[in-house]
Image (cartoon, grey):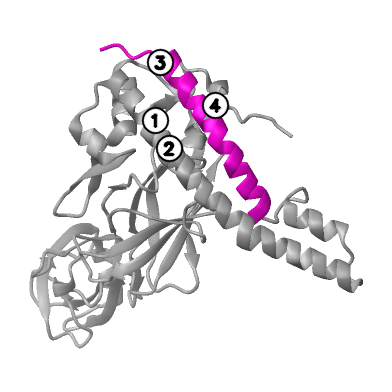
Amino acid sequence: MAVDYTNTFTQLGAEMKVIRKTEALWVQSHFSSNAAYSKRLLESAFSDSNDNEDNAQARGKIFLEDTATPSLISLHSSQVSSFEERFFPVLDDELDTSQTDIDAGAIGYVYNVTGSGEVSIKERTGRLGALRRQMISDSKEIQENTVSLGSLAVIGTNTGVLSLTTATGEDHCLPGNILLEVTNDTVGSTTFSVQLKLTTPIIGGDENGIINADNALTLGQTMEDGWTGATLKVDLGSVVEAGDNGNFFSSTTITSAKAGDTDNGKIYVKVTRQATAPIWLIEYYSDGSLTTLEGTQTADGTSGTVAISITGSSGTVFASTFSKTNAHADMASAPDADSDITFDIVNPRLGDRWKIPVTNNEGGNFATKLARTLGYRASLSSDGSPTETDSLAASASFS
């Protein structure tokens, strides 16, 4: 099978140009962020101090918002439906589209979700999925959009602390903010809802610009999402240590943390000097009253350091470097003990929220119009060296 890419993208570009004209009219009637937009033009032309002029301005803006805008949204929807009815059969001839892709419409996503919560896209279905696969097979590319995801920022006051370890976006990950909110704060299975809130909503989409991810994001696991176009992974921040006044512990990690052997991610450690070897007894508890012992480790000698690792009953692993020198200086004789040392992974709690800013230069005509003008949550094969002429989908100038 050989796809006539020149013909296909010429036709697709022409369709995009036509539908973009309706989208442009919607932008002009609906938004006020530019002085050339219709509402702002009326504001600048009429006087607020004259009753008739003020009334004319107000009624004109109401017409734009309540009549013109919804009519343009309806027209756009009809145009997209017409485009699909006319163009998809043409594309099917080119791609020899499978029934699975035909049934999926424009785009669909099939995911692999592991027991640990890792999410990856197994397959992109639909006509755009089929076109993307064929383009990859034929080493064909459209002009990419430059997409960048920024740093994780707290919204409000959070209990938990996170670090962002993976954050990338496809061409259709449009400008805005990715919003994370804790939906399950159980230690060991903490999950987040994921939304992309667009800076500028798209025609026919959610009025608030909200795009919901298909799956939850699990702490410590990568989530690849088709609908938002984002790939994310968040991990816990650094372990917070308290009560170690003698500086016994350093380089502490808590891994595979579970609810069953921690206090919402917090563990309690007691260090006791014993009268006979082994000199040091290190005990890990899961409660502040030190009644539920999860594990112990001993160390001998009064100088140097030793690596310790204690696994709790549910699998939480407490690992650290224990300084026998510092312990000996702080606790000179048996049965001296330090029983108020705590380590906290600072696990996120219900109500905690974060945002990740998304920038997208919307530099590719095909890439951007697929996402914004046609409203498809999809990206084709793209890189910095396109094989297809991007200007074929450039917006038409008209007056």
Residue 94 is labelled as none
Labels 3 and 2 touching (C-beta < 8 A)? no
Tell me which residue sits at (56%, 33%) in the image: 18
Q: Position of residue 377 (x, y in %)?
A: 39, 43
Labels 4 and 1 touching (C-beta < 8 A)? no
Labels 2 and 1 touching (C-beta < 8 A)? yes
Label 4's element?
helix
Looking at this view, name the residue that lies furthest to the bottom: 289
Residue type at the position of mark 4: Ala
Label 2's element?
helix
Residue type at the position of mark 3: Tyr
Task: List the residue tagged with mark 3.
Answer: 5
Q: Which of 355 and 376 is in front in this view?
A: 376
Q: Which of marks 4 and 1 is in front?
A: 1
Residue 307 magenta-highlighted: no
Task: List the residue tagged with mark 1.
Answer: 86
Q: Nearer the viewer, residue 4 or 220?
A: 4
Residues rendered magenta in the picture: 1-30
Label 3's element?
helix
